[in-house]
Amino acid sequence: MIALDTLMKFRAFRCPINLRILYIQEVCFAARRRYKLMPFSGKIDLFRAEHQPPSDLFEEDPLLGWSGMAAGGIEVHQFPGDHTMYLREPVIAAVVAAQLGACLEQAVAERT
């Protein structure tokens, strides 16, 4: 798809939505393969949906692969449902947004 972009100029011209989705997906996969995750000195606030994809698709991990990545520790914030609910259910999205806001406020307070 990335090679196809040089021919079709997805970024410069409009193309069918189904091709744009495939292109964006491929770019994300390529970036993920190249990225080298490095630990940092801060804390991670991990927002985790209660229902995770089946273990035959993904390895079961309560920290979703973030273990050992933050010297400041990892605080897990568990929310009901699955991650797509936050796009469909405004009430649940508001709860997650409020928790995210609280985490950001705490992070700012800890830096001052």
Image (spheres, helix red, strand yellow):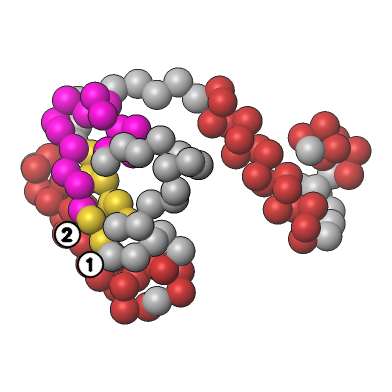
Image position, residue 30 (x, y; %): 63, 30
Measuring from the top left, give residue 104's x and y in whole percent. 21, 53
Is 94 in front, or is 66?
66
Q: Is residue 101 visible?
A: no
Q: Residue at x 22, y 28 (%)?
A: 70
Answer whether residue 31 is visible to the viewer in this image: yes
Instruction: Tell me what residue is drawn at x 15 percent, y 33 percent.
Output: 73
Q: Which residue is mark 2?
A: 102
Residue 23: % across, % down: 73, 45
Q: How many marks?
A: 2
Looking at the image, which residue sits at the far right? 7
Query: Which element type, helix, strand or loop, lies under badge 2?
Result: helix
Residue at image mark 1 = 98
Image: magenta residue range: 63-77
Above or below: residue 5 compared with residue 10: above
- Left or right relative to 68: residue 16: right
Q: Residues within 10 Å of mark 1 (few under 14, many from 20)?
A: few
Q: Is residue 69 magenta?
A: yes
Q: Is residue 13 magenta?
A: no
User: Would you say the residues marked 1 and 2 are in contact, meaning their CB atoms lie under 8 Å apart?
Assistant: yes
Residue 59 vs residue 43: left or right?
A: right
The amino acid marked with disc number 1 is Ala
Label 1: element kind = helix
**On the picture, is 29 further left or further right than 16?**
left
| Location of the C terminus (image quadrant) | top left
Amino acid tagged 2: Ala
Residue at horizontal 12%, vertical 40%? 111
Observer-nearest of 88 and 11: 88
The disc at residue 26 is none
Q: Main secondary structure of the magenta part?
A: loop
Neighbours of disc 2 within 10 Å: few (<14), some (14-19), many (20+)? few
